[in-house]
Image (tube, grey):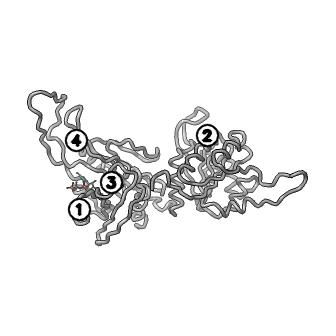
Amino acid sequence: MSSASKLRGKKILLGVTGCIAAYKACNLVRDLIKAGAEVRVILTPSALSFVTPLTLSTLSKNKVIVDVLPKSQGGDYEASPWHIEYGIWADIMLVAPASINTVAKITHGFADNALTTLVTALRSPLLVCPAADLDMYQYSVTQENLNTLRKRGVYVLEAETGELASGLSGIGRFPENGKIIDAVYTILRGNKLDLEGKKVLVTAGPTYEDIDPVRYLGNRSSGKMGFEIAKAAYLRGASVTLISGPSNQTAYPEIKRINVRSAAQMKNAVESEIADNEVLIMSAAVADFTPKAASTQKIKKGGTAPVIELDFTEDILSSLSKTGKFVVGFALETENEVENASKKLERKRLDLIVLNSLNEAGAGFENDTNAITILDKSGEKIRHNLSSKSEIAHIILDRIAVLD
Ligand code: CTP
């Protein structure tokens, strides 16, 4: 499954409210549709000051609802229980952006416009993405309302910290569309905050071992798998630290990211972070060899070609003290896959090992998809067929979510 089909066939209600981030809902509609969803939009009356129904109806290819009650047609009214039909139709409803006013109304059960009325008739999960200027966002009543919604099982995607429309800087920014789509995927998968309270350390990407100031030994890992694990763990409520080798992937701003380059730097970072975490997911493709001595100057050509002498790097997982931690390793194999992975599980004293095969089309390095087998200490082996790396990330986290 590619990211283009992440929400294939899903029926999404998008409620848009009156705040400046409403203009971002236009692109959100496009991205939800690109991800395969069908989208119906509902606007609050004050959203009309920021976006037009025509824009959203053109983008969503569906009519846009603004009024709860039918308009008079020459004095006659036609009954239109649209909110009941919509409430049953949807797989999920998003209120994005959710203004402070709409958050308050939803919390207290108001049904005074089309959007709030629909929420009361909704049978599917509700995702609220509040956005506001920092003082409004942090206002104690707003925070109490958001907490009440959370306690009721509403998924609240916290606003981000950064530059705000007012020119101030702080919490209140509307999240990126990719993160909202990932949250929708997570909720539709049946996971809400099942990792809440867990502290998860993830490693990702390759490591680079320098030969001289210009050249290095590296590998083909893109970091995608580890970044997907970190993002999915965050959306499921974990507090996440991501140690990444050189990678052009992006995580969410709420994920603590530590960038490293070499295997030795990754080892140091893991050693200093492990104590603060209960789970380690070591998905990085750590280099096994490093030049004995990196040249401080660029090695010039001419004469005989240089011979680069290599040393083994230290094995991070084997050398780490893991007492009381739940540790997941990865195994990348090209032959005797299950046998080699199960030996690694034992040798590195792991709780789980995720076997990646390089022999399967669409799996492994640089792809958006992966196929894995998860082996555990009891000898159980479960194969998971080719799926998006995001789904594979969730499958791995399902094993963490059931831990006490
Ligand atoms: N790993 C590690 N430290 C290293 C090398 C690998 O902690 N110096 C970790 C990887 O992050 C992964 C697991 O060990 O979780 C297995 O990595 P893999 O490359 O498959 O195996 P190696 O132990 O390097 O053995 P080989 O390359 O011989 O298969």
Three-letter amino acid code of the residue under disc 4: Leu
Question: Between disc 1 and disc 2, whose residue precedes?
Answer: 2
Q: Foreground mark, 1 or 2? A: 1
Q: Is residue 9 left or right of residue 65?
A: left
Which residue position holds label 3? 364
- Mark 1, ligand 1, within 8 Å: the answer is yes
Q: Residue 326, relative to residue 378: is it above or below?
A: above
Q: Give the x, y percent position of residue 330.
A: 30, 58
Which residue position holds label 2? 133
Packing grade of label 3 (10 A; few <14, some 14-19, many >=20) is: many
Question: Between disc 2 and disc 4, whose residue precedes?
Answer: 2
Figure quadrant of the C terminus: bottom left
Q: Foreground mark, 3 or 4? A: 3
Secondary structure of the residue carrying numbered label 3: loop
Q: Residue 64, relative to residue 88: is it above or below?
A: above
Packing grade of label 2 (10 A; few <14, some 14-19, many >=20) is: many
Packing grade of label 1 (10 A; few <14, some 14-19, many >=20) is: some
Question: Between disc 1 and disc 4, whose residue precedes?
Answer: 4
